[in-house]
Image (tube, helix red, strand yellow):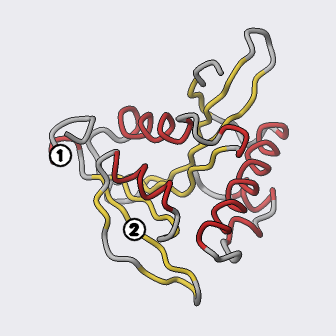
Amino acid sequence: MPTPRIRPLDLTDDATASAVHRIGLAAYAVEAELIGFDGIPALRESLADMRARDLHWVGAVVTDGGAAADLAGFLAWAEAADGSLHIDRLCVAPAHFRRGVASLLLRHALAELAPDRPVHVTTGADNTPALRLYTGLGFVRGADFSPAPGLRMAAFTRPPREAHGGPSGA
């Protein structure tokens, strides 16, 4: 598979928004199985609701050498008033699992979007692949919390670059 390229996503474009929504539903369905909780809010989010969210979006796009492009995954975030970046969602199309897409998107966010700012993210506390990804990229796990009965979430923060010794988390 060619290496995906990161590009901004325009959710006012119907085809882009539909692809993002479809990938999000598929990815969150897998997470729901992993964590044993099918009440993840994004699983019930309509396309219109997703588009209305005040988020910034980037995608990992794979091209076949011609004009055809395949959205392999995406990352959406919000900027907080304190300057930190809050990752709202990081989703990979199941056909692209275990190919480094999530890592590529997250590394892009850390290096290009928030190299000198804290980055926050949450995931299901039993989502082992996500837990490994975040800890492997220098995120520090905080206290778990339960926003709904039967759902346990893990909160992570990656301190600004100067606080952890460089972009690799070393």
Image point (52%, 63%), residue name: 127
Q: Is residue 38 above or below residue 21?
A: below
Would you name the residue on which mark 2 appears?
155
Query: Residue type at mark 2?
Result: Ala
- Indicate the position of residue 72 as horizontal and vertical percent values: 68, 35
Position of the N terminus by quadrant: top right
Q: Position of residue 166 (x, y in %)?
A: 20, 36
Residue at image location 79% in from the left, 50% down from the top:
22
Tell which residue pokes out farthest to the bottom in this image: 149
Image quadrant containing the C terminus: top left
Secondary structure at badge 1 equals: helix
The crowd level at tag 1 (other Cα within 10 Å; few <14, some 14-19, many 20+) is: some
| Label pair 1/2, CB-CB below 8 angstroms | no
Please give left or right for residue 38 compared with residue 160 in the image: right
Helix, strand or loop at disc 2? strand
From the viewer's side, name the closer residue of 119 and 31: 31
Q: Is residue 157 above or below residue 148?
A: above
Three-letter code for the amino acid on which mark 1 is drawn: His
Q: Is residue 73 left or right of residue 112?
A: right
Q: Residues within 10 Å of mark 2 (few under 14, many from 20)?
A: some
**Residue at 58% in and 21% down:** 3
Task: Say which quarter of the image contains residue 63.
Answer: top right
Figure check: 53 above or below 41: above
Give the quadrant of residue 107.
top left
Q: Earlier in the sequence, mark 1 or mark 2?
A: 2
Residue shown at the point (31%, 54%) measured from the top left:
139
Residue 162, how many percent across, how many down?
Answer: 15, 42
Residue that label 1 marks: 164
**Front position in the image: 117 or 159:** 159
Q: Is residue 155 left or right of residue 32?
A: left
The x and y percentages for residue 61 are 66, 28
